Amino acid sequence: MIDRIHDVGYRALPRPRPRRWAPWPIARTALVVAMRRRSTRLAGAFAGFVAFGHAAVISGQVLVSRAADEAGAHEPVLGAASEIARSIVGRVHETLSVFLGVQMFVTALVLAIVAAPLVADDRRTRAFDLYLSRPLSLTDYAIGKLLVAASVPLATIVIPYMCLWLLAVGLAPGDVASNLFELFVPGLVAAVLSATVLASTILGASALGERGRTVGVAYLIGLVLTSALADALAESGYAWGGYLGLQRNVRTVADALLQVTSHGAMVKALLPIDTNPNALIAATVLVVLAAAGLAVLFARLRQEAAAG
């Protein structure tokens, strides 16, 4: 016995493993699986391309504005021409608002690939029994899935918006940069609201289905159809119908917070810029949609837990 102890030696007593935050392993596993898909990387590259395009537009706007101000300070005629140039290329806060509206659709595409299977595939494979067999609550499970869904618009909307704003402030002259400082927080609120609505609604849709691919396609089709219906109703004189469109509501809130009164001729020629009359109603609709998505998610989780 003594020889055996001498051969083995003394070992430190095993220490208790540090307790991890329960939702994090769920979120990490889902993100790793999603990033292995080629479709996820392609959709993410497309979102980056859209952000890069808006960065190029903002750079051009700032440079045109700077050149116009310098020319207008010497010749009044050139000052009038500078105003015409601004009306064509638009201003920075207009581009930031357009970015939030355009990137919303691109982010919905990424979410349809990454977040649509989060709950639907667990329902199809009956994985809830495995999750709930551990010391894991429904809240921990929901938070883990929410972290995955929220990470997508955080990476495609919120962070790019901050980068675009920093680019504009870095290139703009002092007086223009001071005006842009006032728009950072309002624009960030619009970006976070858009990200919240997208993350919660895709999880609510995922909780209703059992196949991630079907949920993703249905989510995109529903988003496009409701936007088209909202535009058609608004153009027909039914102003209330415009609030059915998610993108119209996001644009309305973004324009109001970023103090956009009109858009440049170049933007109007490339994109249809339609908004709703009341920004407060549009923001309320977005909050209600976000709450509805979370309510559907938790209701479905309670139902699955009761059935298990």
Image: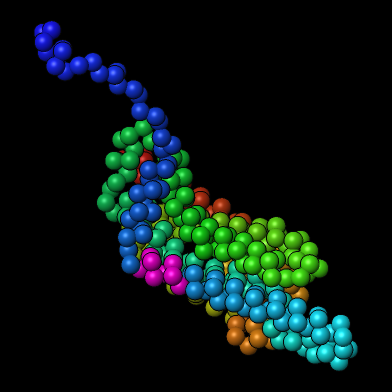
Is 41 in the magenta?
Answer: yes
Is the residue 131 above or below the residue 67 in the image?
above
Q: Quadrant of the C terminus?
A: top left
**Quick one: 90 or 171, which is closer to the camera?**
171
Q: Is residue 292 left or right of residue 174?
A: left
Is the residue 246 above or below the residue 64 in the image?
above
Where residue 107 appears, as percent x and y from the top left, is: 49, 66
Q: For the point 15% across and 13% down, which residue is it?
A: 6
Q: For the point 47% across and 49% down, which residue is it?
A: 147
Is the residue 81 above or below the residue 115 in the image?
below
Q: Is residue 123 left or right of residue 226?
A: left
**Quick one: 307 or 210, which is closer to the camera?**
210
Q: Is residue 285 left or right of residue 183?
A: left
Is 277 in the magenta?
Answer: no
Q: For the point 73% across and 71% down, which residue is it?
A: 172
Q: Quadrant of the N terminus?
A: top left
Q: Residue 228 lies in what quarter of the image?
A: bottom right
Q: Is residue 100 visible?
A: yes
Where residue 295 appears, as percent x and y from the top left, is: 51, 50
**Quick one: 174 or 210, which is closer to the camera?**
174
Q: Residue 274 lies in what quarter of the image?
A: bottom right
Is the residue 307 above or below the residue 88 in the image?
above
Per the picture, the main secondary structure of the magenta-coloured stretch is helix
**Quick one: 247 or 262, which is closer to the camera?**
262
Range drawn in magenta? 39-46
Q: Is residue 252 visible?
A: no
Q: Residue 101 lies in what quarter of the image?
A: bottom right
